[in-house]
Amino acid sequence: MARTRLNSGNTPEEDLPTAKINKDSLRKVSALLKYLRPYRWKFIIGMGFLLLSSITALAFPALLGMMIDAAQGKQKYQWVPGNIHIIGFISFGVLFVQLVVSFFRIRLFVEVAEKSLADIRRDTYFKLITLPMTFFSQRRVGELNSRISADLSQIQDTITTTLAELIRQVIVLVGGISFLFVVSTKLTLLNIAVLPLLVVIAVFFGRYIRSLSRQAQDKLAESNIIVEETLQGIANVKAFVNEAYEAYRYDTTLREVVRIALKGANFRGGFASFIIFAIFSAIVGVIWYGSVLVSHGDLTVGNLTTYILYSAFVGAAMGSFPELYANVQKAVGASERVLELLKEKNEPISIKAEENQIKQKIKGDLIFDNIIFAYPTRKEITILNRLSFQVKAGERVAIVGPSGAGKSTIASLILRFYAPQSGQIRFDHQVADQYSLTDIRNQVAIVPQDVLLFGGSILENIAYGCLNATYEEVMAAAKRANAHQFIIGFPEGYNTLVGERGIKLSGGQRQRIAIARALLKNPVILILDEATSSLDSESERLVQEALEELMKGRTSIIIAHRLSTIRQADKIIVLEKGELIEMGTHQELMQHEKGLYRYLSGLQTST
Ligand SMILES: Nc1ncnc2c1ncn2[C@@H]1O[C@H](COP(=O)(O)OP(=O)(O)O)[C@@H](O)[C@H]1O
Ligand SMILES: [Mg+2]
């Protein structure tokens, strides 16, 4: 089961919730194995190399023991060569094999992991961007981001290192213990007698210490949130002279962090010294009892050396399991979350670029017929209530109303980001469902209030409206959008980089780039969602001109805040709390003495 924790303060990897490993979760996770399929031969060969490298590692203690025995002329077995140099050469031979084998093992595993992970990443990303808007309104972007980065990295680490390491340690453990028995049954039985006790103590302590350190981490995250909040709202903190209060708040959580950490320190210290004591006791015990056996002639010095080395191998293997297990747990959790995402149902959008063509042309008539709509995340709140209106092809219709009335929601419905609960949207008198999403979205364009430019050149950003537009076409669109002048004012012209790493454009400039983009797209239906409301009057004039150019010959839905910009509209729809309360031309609406439009209009002209 996934455990959620506070997110601040830790690196994403540390933050990954773990999962219980059981039959059910493993069966689910095995669905990811299909991504290994294309590379299965490389994976299998890598496994072979892994096996070889583990076996060669296991050969060393035996070889070294033999060498020591050979030095004393005391071989136990007939078939062992008596010559020290021969054993030495064999050892180097084994070393050489290991050298080659280790290289290929790592090389192959990394290749398999990189390639299969790239496939998973590709599929996950594709899935993500084709999911319906409903999905995105239920998740935070940060969470989705961590699916692609932290979760997938965890899976990748597991395939490249953890899995190989786990298999290797299992081989070393099983092989090592078998060899221990072969070398000296008596000694091994002694060891095994005390082992379970050690394991129980280690597991118990380990768990407790981990839970304490988790508590400390959570507390630390809490204190980091205080820092974050106060820094973000520093003006508030200062204006209210609350520095002392915040410092006190921070100090309190810090003390708590220290208290928990110190509590952990007692256990940690006790645990560490116990482990050190146990390890050295084991060494002393083995050598002690081993020496007794050697003095009785039951064991050679070489055997004892071999034995000690194998014990070290086995001990190290055992010691590595808790961490490896924790890693596998994290990877299972990560895989479950990624698989969940891959199972989501995406929008029926054509995936191939060459299929992205308009099949069913729309002329531009638009009808909202008795639309009732609530967002899927807040089903109980009706946003649009029995909304009906009609726009003829080429008409300009303005939608006005207080903020929160549902204006932008209308835009989302036209783009089919969401489907209404009841009622119908019709394009050219045909129900919207009869068009493919691709057809609708290719023929509707929106210019929003806040234009997002992608990291890239201005040229690329304008061409986003029509990916195969030529340079000349882009430039023509920019000219019509009043953008050409300011673009060529930059030293690099159309190749100027914008976005996070590029230059920062003003609101009006970004707006005109968006208009050029829409001009290139050449939509039948155009939606302007408060396109000019955040601009100063100078850029508003330039943008307004560009918008006039853009609206020519198309059905235009103008969502406006400033009523001065929509006087010319063929029809004005006044919306309040999701209901249409007035409709008509500017002149008609102004005649309603008590109308909302006249009231809003009065408010705006008086300021
Ligand atoms: N994605 C969403 N999920 C849930 N509620 C939303 C979402 N978007 C907008 N709303 C709610 O719908 C109502 C109308 O919003 P909106 O259409 O953006 O209003 P307007 O554009 O007229 O200011 C608001 O109450 C808003 O809180
Ligand atoms: Mg809005």
Image (cartoon, rainbow, N blue to C red):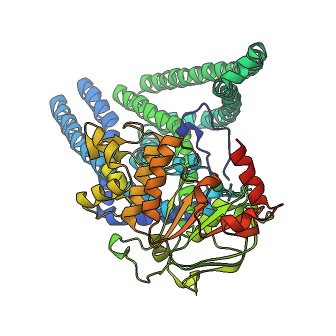
Q: Is residue 227 left or right of residue 120?
A: right
Q: How many marks?
A: 0
Q: Quadrant of residue 388?
A: bottom right
Q: Is residue 110 above or below residue 90?
A: below
Q: Is residue 356 left or right of residue 578?
A: left
Q: Quadrant of residue 103?
A: top left
Point out residue 577 in the picture as x, y percentages from the top left corner. Answer: 78, 61
One can see residue 24 in this view = no
Comparing 527 with 541, the one in front is 541
Comparing 492 with 329, the one in front is 492
Q: Farthest right residue? A: 594
Point out residue 203 in the picture as x, y percentages from the top left corner. Answer: 65, 36
Q: Quadrant of the C terminus?
A: top right
Comparing 146 with 265, the one in front is 146
One can see residue 306 in this view = yes
Q: Is residue 378 above or below residue 443?
A: above
Q: Residue at x 38, y 37 (%)?
A: 501
Point out residue 454 in the picture as x, y percentages from the top left corner. Answer: 41, 48
Q: Is residue 80 left or right of residue 400?
A: left
Q: Is residue 342 above or below residue 289?
A: below
Point out residue 537 in the picture as x, y percentages from the top left corner. Answer: 53, 42
Comparing 503 with 45, the one in front is 503
Ligand 1 falls in quadrant: bottom right
